[in-house]
Image (cartoon, rainbow, N blue to C red):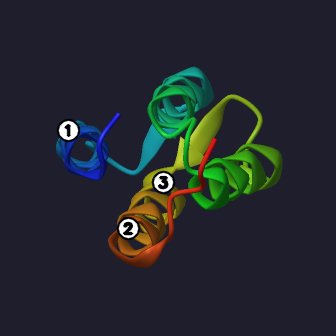
Amino acid sequence: MSESLLQHLIDLLLDGIDGDVSTKSRVIDGLLDLRLGAADNTAIVAQIDRALLEMPGVSSVPNLWWMETLEALRVSLDGSPVSAG
C-alpha cells in the first residue's frame, strides 16, 4: 500500500474516534489494518508492533493514546524509508 493510502487510512481512523475511549478490539483492528498495508515498510511495521504490545487497557483504550499513536505513525510515514524486498 502506498504511503498516501496509509495516510488516508490514518485519517479515517482519526475521524472515527469519538468520546474518551475506544474498544480495544476496534483499536487492534485499526492497527492490524495499518500493519497489513505497511507490510513493505519494516520501520512502520515495527512501530505498529510496539503499539500493539504497549496498548493500555483491558477492554477499552483511552482515545488520547489512540490519537497520539496514529499521529506518531503519520509523522513516521512522512520520513521513514521503505525497505527493499
Q: Nearer the viewer, residue 57 or 71?
A: 71
* Residue name at image x 68 percent, y 28 percent: 59
* Residue name at image x 51 percent, y 68 percent: 81
* Residue name at image x 48 percent, y 54 percent: 66
Q: Is residue 65 left or right of residue 6?
A: right
CA gap, disc 1 and disc 2 = 12 Å
- Please provide percent x and percent y for residue 68: 45, 68
Q: Which of marks 1 and 3 precedes in the sequence?
A: 1
Dividing the picture into quadrants, the one containing residue 9 is top left
Q: Secondary structure at mark 1?
A: helix
Q: Which of marks 2 and 3 precedes in the sequence?
A: 3
Q: Cβ–Cβ below 8 Å for labels 3 and 2?
A: no
* Residue with the mark numbered 2: 71
Q: Which of marks 2 and 1 precedes in the sequence?
A: 1
* Residue name at image x 58 percent, y 44 percent: 61
Q: Nearer the viewer, residue 56 or 31?
A: 31
Asked if 71 appears above or below 21 in the picture, the reply is below
- Please provide percent x and percent y for residue 12: 20, 38
Q: Amino acid at mark 2?
A: Glu
- Please provide percent x and percent y for residue 51: 68, 53
Q: Nearer the viewer, residue 41 or 12?
A: 41
The circle on residue 66 is: 3
Dividing the picture into quadrants, the one containing residue 77 is bottom left
Q: Amino acid at mark 1?
A: Leu
